Amino acid sequence: MTTERKQLVHDFSQRIHGSSAADVGDLLADYYHEDAEWHGPAPIDELHGVGAIADGYWEPLLRSFPDLEKNDYVLFAGEFEGNEWVCATGNLVGTFAEDWLDIPVTGHATWLRYGEFHRVEDGRIAETRHLVDVLDVMRQAGYEFFPALAPEVVIPGPTTQDGVLLDEQDETESDRTLHLVEAMIEGLHEYEAEGLDGMGMERFWHEDFMWYGPAGTGTTRGIDGFQEFHQGPFLEAFPDREGGDHVARFAEGQYCASTGWPSIDATHLGDGWMGLPATDEPVTMRVMDVWRREGDLLAENWVFIDTVDLLSQLGVDVFDRLRNDRQYF
């Protein structure tokens, strides 16, 4: 049942706080299939099997953040192309006590923003797609590599504080949410013909909606802020982008989510995005989106891009910059 899938994932999140690097493998064995697949952010990328997921991701993370908590503020479930999924987003919060991914230790509380999709089979997790904003962890450690146009903040949960949907939701409301998001995605394609002003985003977004973007981009408010600080620079840089190749896309209640691995193909044709000159290089993007509908319009959007992976395709090695202690590009 849907409720059981959601409870499984939420229970796993709650048990992280009581786990350590030494015993997290046992925790994973309680929730994952032994041969589960795990797809994460660069430079971790793909891991196969519970042992590899523990060794490659959770053990190093818990050594670096030994008091780590995993706080879901959105969690819901759905089906896509015959597979059963649970989506969650929130913050991993802990004291940065040991270097992680070559990011120097700070000794301070640190927020690791995450988005994830879990494919559940026979009561256990068979596959996870998990993005953490690695670039934002660097920012919190004092390495601000990119001139973000919008404020970079600790991303909040839904303003309605109702994002963890452990109970069943009204199917009519779920369908309504999904149809709105799919119409909005279709509307994005009008950029090529109509330009930014002709896309008609007011058909889909509340006038003062909140868009929560990744490090290097920041958080925007309202259609004007969204277009000025994110959508405009992004479309100028990647005008030929093609999206929608989703691994999962579903809605429950007033929430919807999608992810692709990658879900966007593009060519870096324009200057300025994240302060970078055009490279004319083809790129792919690992992306996650979570939306909240309010009435007939979208009110909030949590967005994840594996920016470290994208930058590497553009010839920018942020870890080389980090290791050489070069603060700015």
Image (cartoon, rainbow, N blue to C red):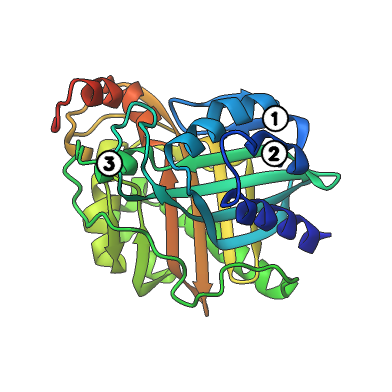
Return the residue nearer the eye: 230 or 218. 218
Residue at mark 1: 50
Residue at mark 3: 106
Residue 324 picture location, percent across and down: 19, 20
Q: CA distance from mark 1 to mark 3?
A: 30 Å
Nearest to viewer (mark 1 / mark 3) = 3
Which element carries disc 2, helix, strand or loop?
helix
Residue 142 picture location, percent across and down: 20, 41
Residues tagged 2 and 1 counted as in contact (Cβ below 8 A): yes
Nearest to viewer (mark 3 / mark 2) = 3
Residue 252 picture location, percent across and down: 66, 65
**Quarter residue 36 falls in:** top right
Question: Which amino acid, mark 2?
Answer: Leu
Lateral position of residue 23 relative to residue 311, left or right: right
Which element carries disc 3, helix, strand or loop?
loop
Rate crowding at label 1 as few (under 14), some (14 to 19) or many (20 or more) other CA atoms within 10 Å.
many
Residues tagged 3 and 2 counted as in contact (Cβ below 8 A): no
Rate crowding at label 3 as few (under 14), some (14 to 19) or many (20 or more) other CA atoms within 10 Å.
some
Q: Where is the C terminus found, in terms of image quarters?
A: top left
Residue at mark 2: 28
Position of residue 110 relative to residue 205, above or below, is above
Question: Which amino acid, mark 3?
Answer: Thr
Question: Which amino acid, mark 1?
Answer: Val
Residue at x-position 62% and y-position 46%: 117
